Image: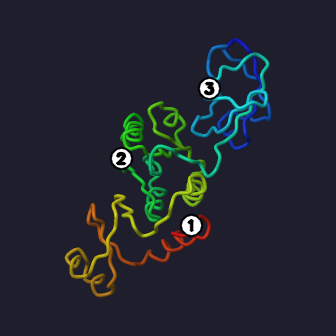
Amino acid sequence: MNGPGIQLTLAPELRLFVPPVRRVERVPTTTDGASSLGHVVESAGVPLTEVGRLLVDGREVPVSYVPQDGQCVEVFGVDRPQQVPGAPLRFLLDVHLGTLARRMRLLGVDTAYENEDIGDPALATRSAAEQRVLLSRDRGLLRRRELFAGAYVYSDNPDEQLRDVLGRFAPVLAPWTRCTACNGILRQADKDSVGDRLEDGTHRSYDVFAQCTACERVYWRGAHHARLERIVDDALVEFGTA
């Protein structure tokens, strides 16, 4: 770019998206005099999914605003909890977020996920078609214009990822109501109806079962239940009751 010069100030949480040398309070930035502020911010490295208010010389402007020479631009992060208008709150996760997907389903959050990499265009198209918020650590994917909505997952630790998503979007939690394998709805099932799907030891040791109405997978309080229960309890304590 070679045109008007502006002073760009990024919120502290957004500075990880820019090179270290630009992670200062105010960055001199040259524009082309025609591009929107949204384009300028994205060119700096910040996905617009992470941008909240934009202030120019203290006045709030839309992303379509074209900055002028000498102006001071402040870029804020999204407000939390973030509102997603236009559809019920539901999510789509990319192939690298499988553990997060299972934990969100465990909490009853509508979470679509593909075990195989279907490619960025297909993910973006599905986000738009099903009106799902796409969660990803891929900045390029989050810049695709066809997305319904998106959000960057800031950590690579599943515990921190879950806390980040729940804190950002405040979804209603309904633990133990979704299949962690396929996202289908669970229903109570008696032992006789699912007996042919159980190993002998499980059949003898457990009496309470649930079954997915979509893929028919059977669930019971097995060896991993205590660990899952801790995940659920921690989420309910911090982010609200079911």
Element type where label 1 sits in the image = helix
Q: Quadrant of residue 56?
A: top right
Which of 139 and 149 lies nearest the eye of the viewer? Answer: 149
Q: Amino acid at mark 3?
A: Ser
State yes or no: discs 3 and 1 in contact (Cβ < 8 Å).
no
Q: Looking at the image, is mark 3 or mark 1 earlier in the sequence?
A: 3
Q: Is residue 103 found left or right of 63 in the rendered image?
A: left
Q: Amino acid at mark 1?
A: Ala
- Of circles 1 and 2, the one toward us is 1
Crowd class of label 1 (few under 14; some 14 to 19; many from 20; radius 10 Å): some
Rendering coords of residue 52 (x, y %)? 64, 39
Which of 181 and 201 lies nearest the eye of the viewer? Answer: 181
Residue at (60% x, 24% y) in the render? 64
Rendering coords of residue 7 (x, y %)? 77, 25
Q: Is residue 148 found left or right of 74 in the rendered image?
A: left
Q: How far apart in space, not on screen, are marks 1 and 2 (Cα)?
A: 28 Å
- Of circles 2 and 3, the one toward us is 3
Element type where label 3 sits in the image = helix
Element type where label 2 sits in the image = loop
Where is 20 relative to 67, above or below? below
Q: Looking at the image, is mark 2 or mark 3 earlier in the sequence?
A: 3
Which of 69 and 228 lies nearest the eye of the viewer? Answer: 69
Question: For mark 3, what is the residue?
Answer: 43
> Can you tell which mark lies on residue 116?
2
> Can you tell which mark lies on residue 235?
1
Rendering coords of residue 183 (x, y %)? 36, 58
Viewport quadrant of the N terminus: top right
Which of 227 and 126 lies nearest the eye of the viewer? Answer: 126
Residue at (62% x, 28% y) in the render? 63
Q: Amino acid at mark 2?
A: Glu
